Amino acid sequence: MKQLNIGDIAPWFSEMDKHKGRKIVLYFYPKDNTPGCTDEACSLRDNYQKFLADGYEIFGVSADSEKSHIGFKAKHQLPFDLIADPEHKIIDAYECWGEKKMYGKTYFGILRKTFVIDENGKIEKIFEKVNTKNHAAQIFGEI
């Protein structure tokens, strides 16, 4: 599979159909209700109106279940959609599954990445080193 780069047409999935023709922030995160993932989601939540004003919709993707996403959204009052991808069709298409290291152990898991996609479906930005607490500012180029 060819690596996704800025300027490439982003893989499209039916879960995003209702927002076709809009700009999209598509972020991949390891697990609902973990500290880093919660910080990232809340950073995007707290700046959601600014994203909307700039014409962006936000989607979060993880391998968690739909039930887990419903609880995570409710607990943190997330105004954007979370996509359950336990079969990794979206995760794999965006190359967000790979080797990770934590506490000296190597394992495979979801790589935290964000893709900013323009209204024509082209990738504008890719964030591979996500600042979870300040991710919205990172996307807006403020940090």
Image (cartoon, rainbow, N blue to C red):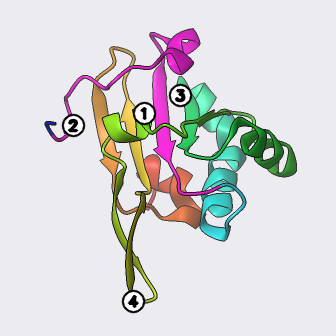
Q: Position of residue 118 (x, y in %)?
A: 36, 23
Q: CA distance from mark 4 to mark 1?
A: 28 Å
Q: Which residue is mark 4?
A: 104
Of badges 2 and 1, the one in the foreground is: 1
Q: Which residue is mark 1?
A: 90
Q: Amino acid at mark 2?
A: Ile
Q: Is residue 30 magenta?
A: yes
Among the two numbered marks 2 and 3 on one chain, the one whose residue lies closer to the N terminus: 2
Q: Are marks 4 and 3 in contact (CB under 8 Å)?
A: no
- Mark 4 falls on what kind of element? loop
Among the two numbered marks 4 and 1 on one chain, the one whose residue lies closer to the N terminus: 1
Q: Position of residue 35 (x, y in %)?
A: 67, 69
Q: Is residue 66 left or right of residue 21?
A: right
Residue pictured at 50% horizontal, 15% vertical: 14
- Mark 3 falls on what kind of element? loop
Of badges 4 and 3, the one in the foreground is: 4
Q: Which residue is mark 2?
A: 6
Q: Amino acid at mark 4?
A: Gly
